[in-house]
Image: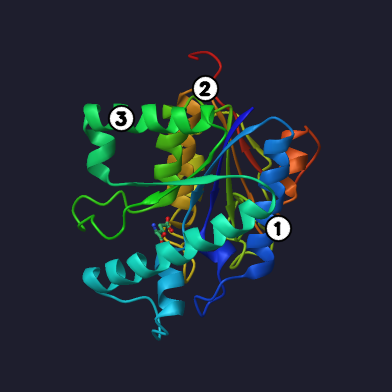
Amino acid sequence: MKIVVKIGTSSLTYKSGHLNIRAVEQLCKVLSDLKNAGNEIILVSSGAIAMGVGKLQLRGKPEDLPGKQAAAAVGQCELMYIYDKLFSEYNHTVGQILLTADDISDPGRFENFRNTINRLLEMKVLPIINENDTLGTNEIRIGDNDNLGAMVAVSVGADLMVILTDTDGLYTADPSKDPDSVLIKKVAVITPEIEALAGGTAGTQGTGGMATKVEAAVTVTEAGTDMVITNGKDVSVLYDIIEGRDYRGTLFCGRKDIS
Ligand code: GLU
């Protein structure tokens, strides 16, 4: 299986911006194992800005664009250093691809991206993708890695995309406000009602909340690919998803009629 795994900042770092070592170690171990089992894995990782905040010992995420871009420049190095180190422990080689919105919208550049990522996969490299946060401007930023991950999943013809986040999936109401809210386990068709459920719920560190995740689900499922939103606090959930066991999360079914 070709699987795109997107992990959010809140699953990778503490509120201080320091690395959640346990979480990242578990992520690298499980993804390495899934690769050993014969799957092709592409990791879309957020966390650059937060890790830059931690490393630069800033009080919080900078408000201004140059501040965020500077934090990302520092944090992206740190992030890749950790991934390189941990995946190497399991004998896997990583390659970094940083994308801007221009790379996606310009057909020639996008073709280059596809050729490169496909070559990396042929070479058994594990591509790690993030937005090129140091170069985007407010007007042209992709802005969130859920949508970026979805574009990547479609462009490589992934069989599955999994978004690891700080909640179990899509609920019938905001679970932090409504104790009666229930996790929706399967979405066969993304209706306007489902899109409405995703209304602005970004956490303190993450970027998009549920809204961008459901947008991503629209892109991915329209290409005929399944997408799952699940909790990144225990990454071994990936085994259950891939091996067809029951898991806590929301499955958005890829549209088979058009694929
Ligand atoms: N590209 C941003 C970062 O690495 C995160 C974007 C997102 O959280 O979706 O910090």
Q: Is there any visible trace of residue 53 in the rendered image?
A: yes
Quadrant containing the N terminus in the rendered view: top right
Q: Tell me the quarter of the picture where residue 246 sits.
A: top right
Taking depth in this image into account, of 212 and 2 the one nearest to the observer is: 2
Ligand number 1: quarter of image:
bottom left
Left or right: 249 in relation to 46: right
Provide residue 94's location: percent of width, then percent of height. 53, 46
Q: Which residue is mark 3?
A: 112
- Report the amino acid beneath label 1: Gln
Provide residue 58's location: percent of width, then percent of height. 39, 84
Taking depth in this image into account, of 196 and 147 the one nearest to the observer is: 147
Provide residue 5's location: percent of width, then percent of height. 57, 44
Q: Which residue is mark 2?
A: 224
Left or right: 54 in relation to 88: left
- Which residue is painted at 49% across and 75% down in the image? 17
Question: Circle 1 sits in a helix, a strand or a loop, which is it?
Answer: helix
Provide residue 230's location: percent of width, then percent of height. 64, 49
Estimate the spatial distance between the alpha carbons at disc 2 and disc 3, rounded to whole Å. 23 Å
Estimate the spatial distance between the alpha carbons at disc 3 and disc 1, rounded to whole Å. 32 Å
Q: Which residue is mark 1?
A: 26
